[in-house]
Amino acid sequence: MAKIKGRIVVDKERCKGCGVCVASCPCNVLALSVYVNGKGYPFAEMAAPDACTGCASCGIICPDSCITVYRQKFE
C-alpha cells in the first residue's frame, strides 16, 4: 500500500494568525510562528512537517483561504 505524505504552503502575508488551523490539525503539524508578517501577525507554519498526512483539515477550516495542501504518494 502506498503512503501519502502531505505538505502545506501558507500565504504568510494573508495569514492573520487566528490559530484555527493549528487547533484543527489532528497530527499537531502546525504552530504559529515566532516571526510576524508585514501586518504584524504571527503566521501559521509547519512545526512538524514529517507528521503531515495531507488531510487538508487546515486548508478547509482557514477563514482566509491562506493554506494550500499538497499530497505526494510514496510506494
Image: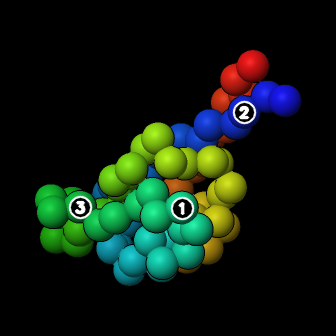
- State which quadrant residue 36 falls in: bottom left
Left or right of 5? Residue 46 is left
The numbered mark at residue 3 is 2
Q: Which residue is mark 1?
A: 27
Residue 74: x and y, percent?
70, 23
Residue 6 visible in rendering: yes
* Labelled disc at residue 33: 3
What residue do we see at 46% from left, 64% from top?
28
Instruction: Assign a secondary structure to mark 2.
Output: strand
Residue at 64 percent of width and 65 percent of height:
57
Crowdedness near tag 1: few (<14), some (14–19) or many (≥20) residues, C-alpha within 10 Å: some
Residue density around tag 2, few if under 14, some if 14–19, many if 20 or more, within 10 Å = few
Q: Secondary structure at mark 3?
A: strand
Please tell me which of labels 2 and 1 falls first in the chain: 2
Q: Compare residues 48 and 57 and report the one nearer the observer.
A: 48
Q: Nearer the viewer, residue 54 or 67?
A: 54
Q: Residue furthest front?
A: 1
- Which tag, 2 or 3, sits closer to the chain's start? 2
Q: Is residue 33 left or right of residue 1?
A: left
Q: Amino acid at mark 3?
A: Ser
The amino acid on which the numbered mark 2 sits, given as a three-letter code, is Lys
Q: State which quarter of the image contains the N terminus.
A: top right
